[in-house]
Amino acid sequence: MSVAGSYRVAVGSQHADLPLVPLNDDLAIALMMTIDMGVQFTSTAGTELARLIEPARPDCVVSVATLGIPVAVEVSRALGLDDYLILQKTPKIHLRDGLREPVQSITSTGTQHLLLDRRRLPAVAGRRVAFVDDVISTGASCAAALRLLEAAGADIVAIGALLTEGDAWRAGLAPRASLVRALGTIPLFEPAPAGGWRPRVATQA
């Protein structure tokens, strides 16, 4: 992974220095890896995110493997829920007949599939569900997860993220963008005239 500096961001009451990772010559992102953030950081962030989505009264918390798992665990714990559901991307043997939905992510190449084990359908079918993740960027991964959960009969009542990135997710998640609650936001980055990277200025519609 090529790193080109760092960006300091507020994540609720905490701060993190995220590495800037170029995706191509014209675009770089500040990369959050929840599995590298430490137990206490994610515990605090999960508790603070839970406070934001608690008014929606979710019965179950759902996220996507792998980076969403720590978020789902800590949000569930803070909400006093004993169960959570993780949508998978690896077609393991028990997921051969699982529900599936294609997805493309800004940080992954090619098309993957989100998979939901049919044995876990009772966890979400007819229940109030909060979908949580580490970062919502284009909204494509989140939207795919919501389509899969809808197919499973879930009632989506909240969407939570540690961070939102840029503003493309608003269009990507319409008409559910209003459900999003996040602890912070990060910009996308473009080349700076003097070298390095600078936050991309949002274009006016």
Image: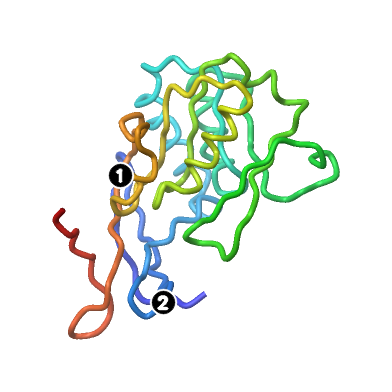
State the CA–CA distance, disc 2 to disc 1: 25 Å
Q: Which mark is residue 102?
A: none
Mark 2–mark 1 CB contact (< 8 Å): no
Q: Position of residue 36 (x, y in %)?
A: 53, 55
Residue occupying the far bottom of the picture:
194
- Tag 2, which secondary structure? strand
Of tags 2 and 1, which is closer to the observer? Answer: 2
Q: Nearer the viewer, residue 39 or 73?
A: 73
Q: Looking at the image, which residue is at 30% across and 40% down?
A: 13
- Residue 89, how many percent across, how many down? 67, 49
Residue 184 disc label: 1
Secondary element under disc 1, as helix, strand or loop, is: loop
Count of all numbered marks drawn on residues in the image: 2
Say which quarter of the image contains residue 25: bottom left
Please state which of residues 92 and 5 is positioned toward the viewer in this rendering: 92
* Residue type indicated by callout 2: Asn
* Residue 37 or residue 139, whichever sits in front: 139
Residue type at tag 1: Gly
Residue 192 sits in quarter: bottom left
Dot 2 or dot 1: first in sequence order is 2
